[in-house]
Amino acid sequence: MHDTDDDLRDEQAFWRALAPETEEHRLAAMALWRPAPRETGLSRTYLERRHGRQPVTYPHDILAAILAPTYGLLIYREELGEIVQAIYPYVDARRLLRLLRHPHHTAQEMERGRFVTAAQATGQFSAPEAEQLFDWLLQWAPVALARTDAEKALRARLASAKNPLTF
């Protein structure tokens, strides 16, 4: 799990800095302690927002209810699904989710127009706001982890802490 002693020390420092108080904090830590969230700065941003050193912002106000538990950050695929389904009908949402998770730039750009039109049709977004949201989704969707994967990783972590010889 750790390539070097430095990796282990970095992870321990991350957990100490996070100071998780809830199950949600522990799950977020499992989702954030992966290469992509660390390389993109998502882990650092989460820490800063969690401790109130950085303001919590949302790509759009209507996403506040979805992203509040993760301090305005897209950490889980389930959040991604909720956001997309708030704009698209189910079948279209599934198509967009596939495109976001498995990038195909030509198809994504074709989908952009449909997304902007659908977002505007909700009455909640202007065209520039919908464009910005689409770009935000493109940026963070590949980093999102399935919440169930974070839960499994946390259970494994807890089990290994209780029974270190079995792991």
Image: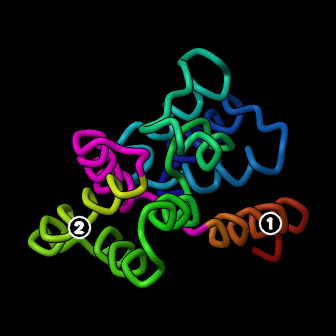
Query: Could you tell me residue 64's position as x and y percent?
Result: 59, 40
Element class at badge 2:
helix
**For the residues carrying marks 1 and 2, which lies nearer the camera in this image?**
2
Which residues are drawn in magenta?
Answer: 123-146
- Would residue 52 be found to the left or right of residue 133 on screen? right
**Which numbered disc covers residue 45?**
none
Q: Are marks 1 and 2 in contact (CB under 8 Å)?
A: no
- The first of marks 1 and 2 along the sequence is 2
Q: Confirm whether the magenta stretch covers residue 88.
A: no
Tag 1: amino acid: Ser
Image: 50 above or below 37: above
Residue at 37 percent across and 52 percent down: it is 140
Tag 2: amino acid: Arg
- Would residue 123 be found to the left or right of residue 33 on screen? left
Residue at 82 percent across and 50 percent down: it is 23
Element class at badge 1:
helix
Classify residue 126 by image quadrant: top left
